[in-house]
Amino acid sequence: MIELYGADYSVYVRSARMALIEKGIAYELVPIDVFAPGGPPESYLELQPFGKIPTLKHGDFTLFETAAILRYIDEAFDGPPLQPASPQPRARMAQLLSILDNYAYKTLVWDIFVERVSKPSGGAPADEVKIASALGRARTIVETLEALVTEGPFLMGDQITLADCHAAPMLALFELSEEGLLLLRSAPKLSSWLQMFKERDSFRKTGLSG
Ligand SMILES: N[C@@H](CCC(=O)N[C@@H](CS)C(=O)NCC(=O)O)C(=O)O
């Protein structure tokens, strides 16, 4: 049995859940709220010493870091392959995951979505300076992704891959901000992929209301 520790509000947890669903693997979401006052429970830090979600447990095997979890989900189970077989597209997919982790998550989710959408919806003011200073980086991210992805239907072409599962949760939040919507309009491949992908079962079933 697979247990995934995390929360449904997390983009990283959603990536892992989407890969599990795409692969056809049953799992249990074990609730961990990393933003609870006082942080996650002490027992969770024994699984993930950095206090981030998700962590996957498969029998005695425990794994954290979403990119590693995604690869494990694809490689350890039967089901449709979620990684290209040949070296160059496989490396390109790994590059997309790395760009999402190292550049996109902080800029698109924290600096723009959280400031423009999330904080104001809870009654807190947006930090306009933070948003303004993230916009140049956000444009670079969108332009870079647009240059690296294929004409579709998926980011890597005909086959859905881990890159789709990892990109969709982050880009869907980014698109909820006015800045994100505008920047994505300048990236036709990325925005038509996102509109298509948001209708997919694995995406719809893992939303906050899913
Ligand atoms: N490098 C981690 C990042 C995961 C991550 O940042 N998760 C967020 C939720 S989307 C989190 O746990 N944040 C809690 C915090 O930063 O204190 C991974 O790949 O799994």
Image (cartoon, rainbow, N blue to C red):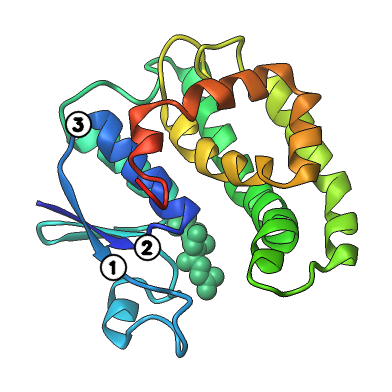
Residue type pointed to by label 1 = Pro
Residue 31: mark in rendering: 1
Q: Quadrant of residue 5?
A: bottom left
The answer to whether the beta carbon of the residue marked 2 is less than 8 Å from any atom of ligand 1 is yes
Position of 50 compared to 176: left or right? left
Marks 2/1 in contact by CB < 8 Å: the verdict is yes
Disc 2 element: loop
Residue sitting at x 68%, y 68%: 119
Q: Real-space Cα distance between discs 3 and 2?
A: 20 Å
Residue sitting at x 78%, y 29%: 143
Disc 1 element: strand
**Quick one: label 3 or label 1, which is nearer the N terminus?**
3
Q: Nearer the viewer, residue 136 or 183?
A: 183
Disc 3 element: loop
Residue type pointed to by label 3 = Gly
Vertical arrangement, residue 147 with respect to residue 201, above or below: above
Q: Nearer the viewer, residue 172 or 91?
A: 172
The answer to whether the beta carbon of the residue marked 3 is less than 8 Å from any atom of ligand 1 is no
Q: Which of pointers 3 and 1 indicates the residue nearer the eye?
A: 1
Residue sitting at x 11%, y 61%: 60
Q: Residue 115's spot in the image, x, y percent?
A: 74, 63
Vertical arrangement, residue 10 with respect to residue 153, above or below: below
Q: Nearer the viewer, residue 117 or 82?
A: 117
Position of 14 compared to 102: left or right? left
Q: Quadrant of residue 191?
A: top right
Vertical arrangement, residue 109 with respect to residue 123, above or below: above
Q: Which residue is mark 3?
A: 24
Question: How would you rate the neighbour count of disc 3 (Cα within 10 Å): few for under 14, some for 14-19, many for 20 or more?
Answer: some
Q: Residue 64's spot in the image, x, y percent?
A: 35, 59
**Quick one: label 3 or label 2, which is nearer the N terminus?**
2
